[in-house]
Amino acid sequence: MTAAPAIELRGISKAFGPVQANRAIDLVVPRGTIHGIIGENGAGKSTLMSILYGFYRPDAGQILIDGKPVAIADSQAAIRAGIGMVFQHFKLVPNFTVLENVVLGAEDGRFLRRSLARARGELKRLAAEYGLQVDPDALVEDLSVGHQQRVEILKALYRRADILILDEPTGVLTPAEADHLFRILRSLRDEGKTIILITHKLREIMQITENVSVMRRGEMVASVRTAGTGPAELAELMVGRKVLLRVEKPLARPGAPVLEVQGLRMVDAEGVERLRGIDLAIRAGEILGIAGVAGNGQTQLLEILGGYPPAGATLSGEIRLGGRPLPLAGSQGRARRRAGIGHVPEDRQAEGLIMDFTAWENMAFGYQDAPQFQRGPLMDNAALRADAMGKIARFDIRPPDPDLAAKSFSGGNQQKIVVAREVERDPDLLLVGQPTRGVDIGAIEFIHKRIVALRDAGRAVLLVSVELDEIMALADRILVMFDGRIMGERLPAEATAAELGSLMAGVEPARADAGGIAG
Amino acid sequence: MERMPKWADVILTPLISLVLAFALSALLILAIGESPAEALKVVVQGALGSSYGWGFTLYYATNFIFTGLAVAVAYHAGLFNIGGEGQAAMGGLGVALVVLALPWPHWALALPAAAVGAALMGALWALVPAWLQARRGSHVVITTIMFNFIAAALLNYVLVNLLRPVGSMDPASASFPAATHLPKLSEMALALGVEWGRNTPANISFFVAVAACLLVWLLIWHTRRGYEIRAFGKSATAVRYAGISALRITVLAMLVSGALAGLMAVNNVMGEAERLVLNAVEGAGFIGIAVALMGRNHPLGVLLAALLFGFLYQGGGELALWTSIPRELIVVIQALVILFTGALDNMVRMPLERLFMALRRKGA
């Protein structure tokens, strides 16, 4: 048996109550390849990987590792079978060092000294072999997200994993970090490791995988060689219908300026200048896109405009809405909403939603003091529910159950709850941060359409996204942010990805290349 | 999807916990050579077997409703108020000051005024910890505990040096005038022609407590402030985004919590003792924590749990009186109930959830 596949799944099925999460899944992953698994949220990818990692037992089916049938009862058994998993949300102890995290759960004996010494040597070897450099003595909480992810990979490799499963590994990474991750994955593959990459980013699949399997509604609908397919075909397989990768939108008809920002500076509590003089204006009926690598001040800009600057920050500059200056300091969220600013925040789980609240409670979050939701001294819960039912219908939120907690919805439907709430207030200015992060393609299309519709109704939209494709597709004008500054302004029709990329990297292209766009 | 039906969550789980706690208590009673069946009989008989027993059970339950609600309201804001003891003690001071300050013509006038005094003093005692938490990050668990001790010391001083009638040897306030004595439930029953609970301390405050349950329910689930309190308790980051002030919610929740704990004094000080004595609260502030835990921080649950603890308190007293089971064992039994219904809740809940999931799978 020369070429037994590293993993073979035969007829794996798994049901949760009435929901068939996986139905007769077959999957073959040859040794030494990178295999993509792609599908919308709720397609069953995570369930399948949880079965492989021993979190769930399949109702039916067989798992073969290297051609031999195995029973994976728990994650310890999975580790023994040579399977390592890197979760989307890392399982690290923040106040332990890298070394301690790697050793945790794999100690050699009663005393740590020997384990730590052995791990130190092993980490050095792995770092040299795969480009996985991390300071072994750094505290995990001090590391960037990209480095924390490396620690997760190191943990798996230290446990002698031959098969590495990565669940949405680039969701939290900057483009540069993602590129580095891909280099690491390639070198792991070249050393004979087998890698399964779960994602819903088509570009990543095209970029790095040899084979790709597409899941839809619990079934494996296709397994193909990546070289023999394209993003459009994959997208179609995922959603089972044609998807508009480009957004259809009429020409913008910009009106009077809605938001004007002048000389906005922000120094955070640690004394770091996060915004170094931002000037921008958004007119009615246009979408201003802010492109940039995450962590260049976009988050802070959104928070300040949304009325909740980071604690301890010092602000200066001017923000005017419809010509009237807005106060900068303090908690202004309530006043901003009343002034007509809606905000779809970057992090829907930590900010946009109360995960334990029901859908109907979340549909009023931030607007709980709106007059139409009050009845004398009490809140009109019936009105809230009726309002929510309407939004659920209009935004096709599934399942259409207003009493379900927000945490029970998929990522795409959670985002629809936030977007429905903010868009239907018909704000003069809508702030949108990463509207489609971790959202499936069907919902992406829907959310994009709603944003465009708002702009066509003569509202101003500020769109912040690290997805360049999204900015290019939606924005009427593009500003690029780097290190707390606006590096330049481009029109999407005239800008190239390469040009925007160099602006995002902080390089001002020669004026001749800029195509004569006046500043 | 819910893991199990709501009735199993709110009724079955605490019930099983309770049975487990009683089973272990029975073993303990066996171990010291007494009969569990006999003990159970004495407890049930003593607490519920007569209107006399009920009169005491309801009196204790009234105390626990107030302190349980106090813990529950703070819990919804993500705050753990374990200062109910001190807040209730200060509530007692509020009652005494109001009742002794003016010549009240009738209890119906004195009651609302004393309630306001009790609530204000309780709220005041929660205000400083709340402010310290919101502004300085001093943990409210630590500060409210400290304030329990400060309240005890302050009351000691006030009773000995200020409120003690001249010539009295007793560190207690003067007795409240007869006009301010609250009607006992027994008297109210008698007015309706029913002989019920003679010589028991249960009084009209019980209805104040039930009304407080209703008001807390309205506040938490049917007002904008309640919505904001719950939102703050669930996600401090989201609340920032929504423009809800953490300081305001923390202070508001603690003020309401402290006021509820303070209101307990209407029952024990005004309704029962009819004067302010040292250590009037007798641990009811701490039992409120267990009551809130067991009652799932819901007013109806708090009401039921308070009745249970009132029953245990009264029945336990009878047990010490009529059997040779030592008083300390009753405390142990109460502790077991707290342990099983509160701290070990998941021990029952998780197997039960698995059971219901399995049942559902079979049914599907």
Image: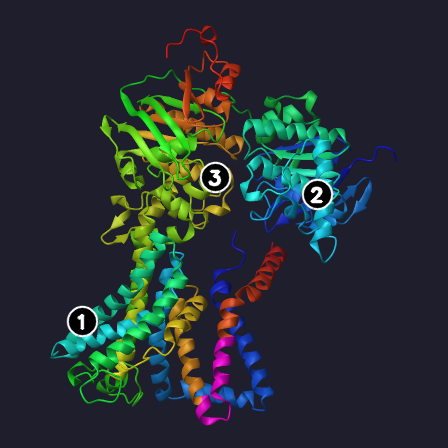
Residue A211: image location, x then y, percent = 70, 28
Residue at 61 percent of width and 26 percent of height: A179
Q: Which quarter of the figure is the C terminus of chain A placed in?
A: top left
The chain carrying label 1 is B
Q: Is residue A503 above or below residue B235?
A: above
Q: Is residue A181 above or below residue A411?
A: above
Q: Is residue A499 above or below residue B225?
A: above
CA gap between label 2 and label 1 equals 71 Å
Label 1 packing within 10 angstroms: few (<14), some (14-19), many (20+) = some
**Dominant secondary structure of the magenta stretch?**
helix
Label 2 packing within 10 angstroms: few (<14), some (14-19), many (20+) = some
Residue A334: image location, x then y, percent = 29, 41
Residue at 51 percent of width and 90 percent of height: B325
Read off the magenta span.
B319-336
Residue A437: image location, x then y, percent = 50, 33
CA gap between label 3 and label 2 equals 44 Å
Amino acid type at image mark 3: Asn
- For residue B328: magenta? yes
Q: Tell me the tag on residue B143.
A: none
Query: Quick check: marks 3 and 2 in contact, CB under 8 Å?
Result: no
Q: Nearer the viewer, residue B231 or A490?
A: A490
Q: Is residue A73 visible?
A: no
Q: Nearer the viewer, mark 2 or mark 1?
A: 2
Which residue is label 3 attached to? Answer: A413
Label 3 packing within 10 angstroms: few (<14), some (14-19), many (20+) = many
Which residue is label 2 attached to? Answer: A120
Left or right: residue A136 compared with residue B316:
right
Residue at 55 percent of width and 63 percent of height: B346
Which residue is label 1 attached to? Answer: B113
Give residue B288's quadrant in the image.
Answer: bottom left
